[in-house]
Amino acid sequence: MGLIIKEKEFVIPGDIVAEGIDYLPAGGVFREKDKIIAGQIGIVSVDNRLIKLIPLTGIYKPKAGDVVIGQVVNISFNGWSIDMGFSNLALLSVRDATSEFIERKSDLSRYFDFDDYIVAKISNVGKGNLIDLTMKGHGLMKLRDGMLIDVSPSKVPRIIGKQGSMINLLKDLSKCQVHVGQNGKVWINGDNCEKLIEAIRVIERESHISGLTEKIEKLLGGR
Amino acid sequence: MMVTATNAYNKRMDGRNFDELREIEAKVGVVKSADGSAMFKIGDTIAIAAVRGPRDLYPRFMQNPKGGILRCSYNMMSFSVDERIRPGPSRRSREITLVTENALMPAVDLSEFPNSVVDVFIEIVQADAGTRCAGICAASLALADAGIPMRDLVCAVSVGKVGGKILVDLNKYEEDYEDGSSDMPVAFLPRRNEISLLQLDGGMKKEEILNALELAKKSCVEILEVQRNALMGKYKNG
């Protein structure tokens, strides 16, 4: 009864995390009869009676409210289809795209063309993975110039840091523009991006090591 | 190699015990561009599996709005056996693709990914019997590496009867043993205690099959430990 695998322990799919009805399964674990079982590779996290996994691998799973970076892959009569690295495309409808008035039958590629990258927010994740995006909000925009790098979606929280501490550090020290999408896409623009890319790679690789902030400060501040 | 006609198979060619597996090596993350990948080596049999997805599924009529589908592909490389085998799909590889898919299906949960597909590619680099089992072991590691929601890992091993003896993990020599050899690949979900693949080539009595299954389950637990260590090797320290 109770927890079988302690908090912060490593689990693989099929491991029994807890027995009995004292705990509730959240993300990454599931219940089978009276056992709570891990469904992914991850680290166990216990919050009161809630057990969830911090996944160490896997594709990005969309959540309402997440800011993501995606690419326009299709334009239909009422909006754009956006690829954000998930198995299903997301939909950005004309209504949510700009505050401008868009006339009926107007050419939507004037706003966002094929292959354009945008920063958008997920407004709703419906049944069957119908994902709605919105561009109305602070910092949501079309991306011009710059470059895009891929990181593992599970490392994004470390790149952002507590209340954005890490990302602000990156922005301040490198003097680059940075946008991080929850889906593991990082857009950067500015001179001297090489150091910044290196720093992001270090965060990705050594995300579990304490004293990471000092290390990044040293890496970026030393120039 | 000529096999002399003796009825008793008292000792195995490679000196193993009858319930002893060949040496196993497993490694996760061998194909960098794939979402998940693994290598599984048992004796001289080497399988590499790569997982891509979940991703959009085309042709469209194959899409299932209730959940994603699993699509496997099993292939032996032309140099994997002594005599070159013709590349491309064959009757045999189509069969193994099907049974692999059915063996992995109960372990994965794709209900979160409607209209999409998870592709599993299994390549046999070197074959010395038990390739479908090695393929399934590699595929299950690769699926876990790709972060696909899973109910359990899948372990697979072949058991059989060679010269009247029940033994585990046959090699090519034992599979071709002249005085009667039957082999039975078994895929096993250790936690759920379920068998997801059971084929039999040859003939065995009911008791023999039951004994062989017990042996297979015992060996699968050993394989699970190897798989666990392989996954830890990649993720525990980073």
Image (spheres, coloured by chain):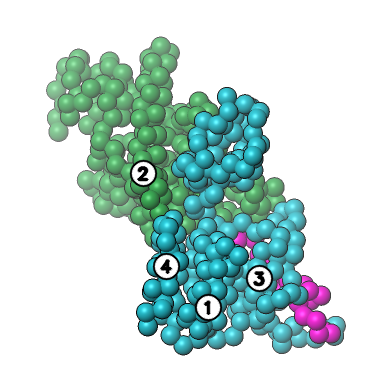
Chain colours: A cyan, B green
Question: Residue A214's mark?
Answer: 4
In the image, what residue type sits under mark 4? Glu
The chain that hosts pointer 2 is B
Q: CA distance from mark 2 to mark 1?
A: 38 Å
The chain that hosts pointer 1 is A
Q: In the image, is residue A213 part of the stretch drawn in magenta?
A: no
Q: Which residue is mark 3?
A: A82
In the image, what residue type sits under mark 1? Lys
Name the residue nearer the viewer: A212 or B33.
A212
Q: Which residue is mark 1?
A: A171
Marks 2, 1: nearer the viewer: 1
Q: Quadrant of residue B16?
A: top left
Q: Are marks 2 and 3 in contact (CB under 8 Å)?
A: no
Res. B168 visible in picture: yes
Q: Could you tell me which residue is drawn at 66 percent across and 64 percent down?
A: A66
Q: CA distance from mark 3 to mark 1?
A: 27 Å
Q: Could you tell me which residue is drawn at 60 percent across and 61 percent down?
A: A86
On whether disc 4 and disc 2 are found on a single subunit, the reply is: no
On whether disc 4 and disc 1 are found on a single subunit, the reply is: yes
